[in-house]
Image (tube, grey):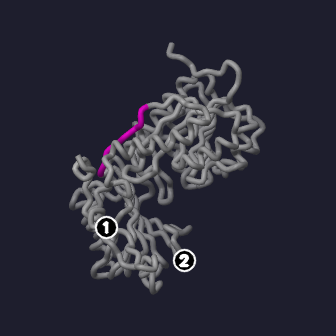
């Protein structure tokens, strides 16, 4: 059987070479996962040969909860998708990807309405070569409930009055086809550079988008980070909770560094366990505190701080430290602190195994004892890996059942 016959997700944009973002799409999904597992094992097995759990594999299509669409074309005929590059490598012409199979039918329907809204509200698409226009990106996030967050990334405030004027009609049109926008905003990004969004946000409707994961409501504000694959993220949190619960008395105090809106911290909260979540984003901490208050959980605290700077200032370490850093990893300062701290366990969730391996090289006292690949980003070389690290010492071992 050839690769195309084995593929479950077909994409006419990929086949026509209009979009090759899903660079592994020509491979059957099982082969993609095998290749990712081989890659991460080559990086981690030499460090400690952990016990590998079977990879977590989710849906092959309609799994992505966030659409990041470049807006191009004209007011009358906008494109939502990516920019094609010319022979010089300069992006300019828009490639419309409203029907991209990574997104659900609900997101497809929302993108169709939003394309019409560009015309109705006269939101001039930003033209990269000439540096003219107003609307740069449309960002749509879908919650498990089907509710949506919609963000317009604008060059300036010029089109805000028209956006506000026509927004009620957009919300009504969405409701007519069974769509509900819980949160709508305009982000201002005036610079001509490859940056998705700016620092200023104008909320136009609602306050948060509720992402319910494993029965826990996580409240996303406009710039909150959340994993792009909700199904696999739910399994990530469940696996983390399972491993930490096995440690029992060895994990009475837990720090969740880079905690975001509290996904790990709220899943790890339990009677007799103190959990501290630390995140630099004030918006994310507001959301995390709201979720904790709604659940009525005790022993959970959230702090707005730079996670690494906060940790290195403490006069003691938690029993277990959770780190879920961006792609650049935890960096030398936090790695050095962990190496010399009194912590017994580290739970490291990484979206970049290369920087994970580099961080582990700076922490020679730590060994991976359990690991799991999570195929968070199908059809690309990227993946998430969850690793339980134990400080190496005589007699150290994982708890056994019973």
Answer left or right for 185 relative to 307. left
Task: List x then y, in percent, for residue 363.
Answer: 69, 39
Residue 132 position in % (x across, y down): 45, 85
Q: Give yes or no for residue 57 being in the magenta stretch.
A: yes
How busy is the neighbourhood of tag 2: few (under 14 within 10 Å), some, or many (20 plus)?
A: few
Report the magenta stretch's main SS: loop
Q: Quick check: can you spot residue 172? A: no
Between residue 109 and residue 347, name the one nearer to us.
347
Against 382, residue 139 (above or below) is below
Counting the numbered discs, the total is: 2
Q: Nearer the viewer, residue 17 or 330?
A: 17
Q: Mark 2 sits on what residue?
A: 191
Residue span colored magenta: 54-61
Q: Which residue is mark 1?
A: 17
Q: Nearer the viewer, mark 1 or mark 2?
A: 1
- Marking on residue 389: none
9 relative to 339, above or below: below
Q: Determine the residue positioned at 54% across, 32% down.
A: 269
Could you say where residue 94 lies in the image, as x and y percent from the top left?
35, 75
Q: Are marks 1 and 2 in contact (CB under 8 Å)?
A: no
Q: Is residue 364 above or below residue 88?
A: above
Q: Residue furthest top?
A: 402
Q: Secondary structure at mark 1?
A: loop
In this view of the protein, which residue sits in the foreground, 238 or 281? 238
Q: Secondary structure at mark 2?
A: loop
* Residue 254 is inside the magenta segment: no
Q: Residue at the location (45% across, 80% down)? A: 88
**What is the spatial separation of the Cα atoms under label 1 and label 2, in whole angstroms?**
30 Å
Tell me the quarter of the picture where residue 103 sits: bottom left
């Amino acid at each position: 059987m050839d690769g195309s016959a084995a593929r479950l997700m077909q994409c006419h944009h990929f086949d026509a070479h209009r979009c090759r973002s899903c660079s592994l799409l020509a491979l059957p999904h099982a082969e993609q996962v095998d290749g990712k597992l081989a890659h991460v094992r080559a990086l981690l097995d030499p460090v400690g040969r952990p016990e590998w759990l079977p990879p977590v594999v989710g849906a092959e299509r309609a799994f992505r909860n966030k659409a990041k669409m470049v807006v191009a074309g004209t007011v009358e005929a906008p494109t939502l998708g990516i920019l094609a590059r010319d022979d010089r490598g300069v992006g300019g012409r828009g490639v419309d990807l409203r029907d991209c199979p990574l997104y659900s039918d609900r997101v497809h329907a929302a993108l169709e309405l939003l394309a019409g809204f560009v015309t109705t509200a006269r939101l001039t698409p930003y033209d990269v070569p000439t540096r003219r226009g107003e609307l740069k990106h449309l960002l749509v996030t879908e919650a498990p409930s089907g509710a949506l967050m919609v963000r317009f990334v604008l060059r300036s405030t010029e089109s805000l009055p028209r956006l506000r004027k026509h927004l009620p009609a957009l919300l009504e049109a969405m409701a007519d086809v069974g769509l509900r926008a819980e949160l709508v905003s305009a982000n201002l990004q005036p610079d001509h550079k490859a940056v998705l969004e700016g620092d200023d946000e104008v909320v136009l409707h609602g306050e948060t988008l509720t992402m319910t994961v494993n029965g826990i409501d996580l409240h996303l504000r406009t710039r909150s980070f959340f994993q792009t694959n909700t199904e696999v993220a739910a399994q990530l949190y469940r696996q983390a909770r399972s491993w930490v619960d096995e440690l029992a008395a060895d994990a009475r105090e837990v720090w969740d560094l880079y905690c975001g809106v509290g996904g790990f911290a709220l899943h790890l909260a339990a009677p007799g366990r103190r959990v501290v979540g630390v995140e630099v984003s004030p918006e994310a901490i507001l959301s995390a505190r709201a979720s904790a208050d709604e659940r009525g959980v005790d022993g959970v605290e959230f702090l707005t701080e730079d996670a690494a700077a906060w940790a290195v200032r403490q006069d003691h370490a938690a029993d277990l430290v959770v780190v879920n850093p961006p792609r650049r990893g935890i960096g030398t300062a936090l790695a050095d602190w962990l190496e010399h701290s009194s912590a017994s366990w580290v739970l490291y969730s990484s979206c970049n195994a290369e920087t994970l391996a580099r961080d582990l090289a700076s922490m020679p006292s730590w060994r991976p004892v359990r690991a799991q690949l999570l195929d968070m980003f199908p059809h690309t070389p990227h993946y998430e890996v969850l690793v339980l690290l134990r400080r190496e010492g005589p007699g150290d071992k994982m708890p056994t059942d019973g």
